[in-house]
Image (tube, grey):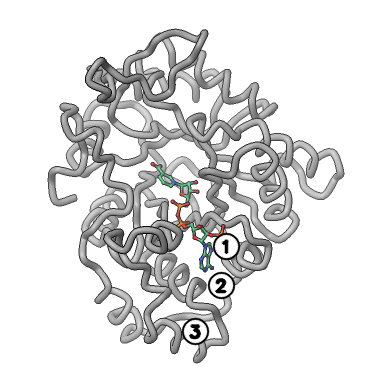
């Protein structure tokens, strides 16, 4: 099964479901990206911060050299990390991602968050710089200046599309009022517990897609810590819906996220689940079933960025 494509505001198309790769380091990133590409996935989500661009890129290049797919068949997303927000660092950071991936261009380059961290140079590179109180050491670079430097990457042909991640509606408005190139997506947490209906509506009205990260509400977190948001795939009503459609509870949840009008990027390092997660385009939840799925919303975040609450651009202190 493959995912349908969605037209972005710049004319490029993004596959409506992708593979998340967070914490799929080294060999895993390679093995599961390759497996996903061999099983219908055409959209892969990585990030400089995940430190797996090289293994993801190795899988992509191998698939291309084996003539199973062409470069233009694959939509690769990676992200500018928070230490590289200073405008003079943006092109260097993008070129490092391209080198890691061993690709000529990136399909979609996202600003990972609106929050900048202190940059301590390349050698050794510190992804999570801490101060003497063991708190994250921030920079106060304005994300608008970072975004303007990202626009130049489009001009240079290093990236085809740019976008943002973890931005709230006010930050999106500020980008739209000041920038030349509209973001094509805002990648945010979106799942049954935090269904983002207002942010989805807000972005849709501005022709910006929503990419949904942690679409399954991170079941591995809940398993270890019951204070984390409870994934709806454990609920007996979702299990029953799965039985009705001949689908797994995970597929029901992903179908819901897709029917909200967003692009889910589930992560899995289990071959059967990788195959299952993209197999959601042959059935449709009814309006009543969508209402049931919406009833799991509590607003609790799986990824609250709790260590960033003191930053002036902290994004989760307004409703959406
Ligand atoms: N922009 C950002 O700030 C940001 C933040 C977080 C995540 N992301 C992106 O979003 C991707 C997905 O989010 P996530 O990894 O946080 O969470 P997720 O996709 O909601 O959950 C991943 C977990 O769900 C399990 N799983 C996968 N498919 C399943 C299924 N069908 N049924 C039951 N369990 C299943 C996986 O276990 P197995 O591996 O054993 O299958 C894994 O432990 C990330 O990998 C990353 O690419 C972006």
- The residue nearer to you, when weighing 123 against 248, is 123
Q: Is residue 65 left or right of 79 when viewed as pictured? A: right
- The residue nearer to you, when weighing 276 against 183, is 276
| Element type at mark 2 | loop
Expressed as whole percent of the image width and height from the top left, the position of residue 231 reads 37, 68
Expressed as whole percent of the image width and height from the top left, the position of residue 256 reads 40, 71
Q: Is residue 27 left or right of 255 when viewed as pictured? A: right
Residue 39 occupies which quadrant of the picture? bottom right
Which badge, 2 or 3, comes first in the chain's sequence?
3
Q: Is mark 1 within 8 Å of ligand 1?
A: no
- Residue tagged by mark 2? 281
Up/down of 6 relative to 94, above or below:
below
Q: Quadrant of the N terminus?
A: bottom right
Which residue is pictured at 57% across the width and 52% down the height? 19
Q: Are marks 1 and 3 in contact (CB under 8 Å)?
A: no
Gap between marks 1 and 2, in whole Å?
A: 8 Å
Comparing marks 2 and 3, which lies closer to the viewer?
Answer: 3
Q: Are marks 1 and 2 in contact (CB under 8 Å)?
A: yes
- Residue tagged by mark 3? 242
Q: Callout 1: 10 Å neighbours few (<14), some, many (20+)?
A: few
Expressed as whole percent of the image width and height from the top left, the position of residue 271 reads 68, 62
- Residue tagged by mark 1? 4
Q: Is residue 180 left or right of 63 when viewed as pictured? A: left
Residue farthest toward the left in the current orientation of the protein: 318
Is residue 124 among the parts visible in the rendering?
yes
Residue farthest toward the right in the current orientation of the protein: 66
Comparing marks 1 and 3, which lies closer to the viewer?
Answer: 3
Up/down of 118 relative to 201, above or below:
above
Which residue is pictured at 34% across the width and 20% down the height? 146
Q: Callout 3: 10 Å neighbours few (<14), some, many (20+)?
A: some
Expressed as whole percent of the image width and height from the top left, the position of residue 137 reads 27, 19
Up/down of 272 relative to 213, above or below:
below
């Amino acid at each position: 099964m493959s995912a349908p494509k969605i037209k972005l505001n710049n004319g490029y198309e993004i596959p409506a479901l992708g593979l998340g790769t967070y914490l799929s380091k080294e060999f895993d990133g390679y093995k599961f990206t390759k497996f996903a590409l061999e099983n219908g996935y055409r959209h892969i989500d990585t990030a400089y911060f995940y430190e797996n661009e090289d293994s993801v890129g190795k899988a992509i290049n191998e698939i291309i050299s084996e003539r199973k797919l062409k470069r233009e068949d694959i939509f690769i997303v990676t992200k500018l990390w928070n230490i590289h927000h200073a405008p003079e660092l943006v092109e260097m950071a993008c070129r490092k991602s391209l080198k890691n991936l061993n690709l000529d261009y990136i399909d979609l380059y996202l600003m990972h968050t609106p929050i900048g961290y202190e940059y301590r140079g390349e050698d050794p590179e510190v992804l999570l710089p801490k101060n003497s109180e063991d708190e994250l050491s921030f920079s106060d670079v304005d994300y608008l200046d970072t975004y303007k430097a990202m626009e130049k990457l489009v001009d240079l042909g290093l990236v085809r599309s740019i976008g943002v991640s973890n931005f709230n509606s006010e930050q999106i408005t500020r980008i739209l009022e000041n920038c030349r190139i509209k973001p094509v997506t805002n990648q945010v947490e979106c799942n049954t517990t935090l269904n983002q209906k207002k942010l989805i509506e807000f972005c849709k009205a501005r022709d910006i897609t929503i990419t949904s990260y942690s679409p399954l509400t991170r079941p591995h977190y809940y398993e270890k810590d019951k204070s984390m948001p409870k994934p709806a795939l454990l609920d007996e009503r979702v299990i029953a819906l799965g039985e009705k459609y001949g689908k797994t509870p995970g597929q029901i949840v992903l179908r819901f996220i897709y029917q909200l009008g967003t692009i889910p990027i589930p992560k899995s390092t289990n071959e059967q689940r990788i195959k299952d997660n993209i197999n959601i385009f042959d059935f449709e939840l009814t309006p009543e079933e969508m209402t049931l799925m919406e009833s799991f919303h509590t607003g609790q975040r799986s990824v609250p960025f709790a260590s960033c609450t003191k930053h002036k651009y902290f994004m989760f202190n307004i409703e959406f």
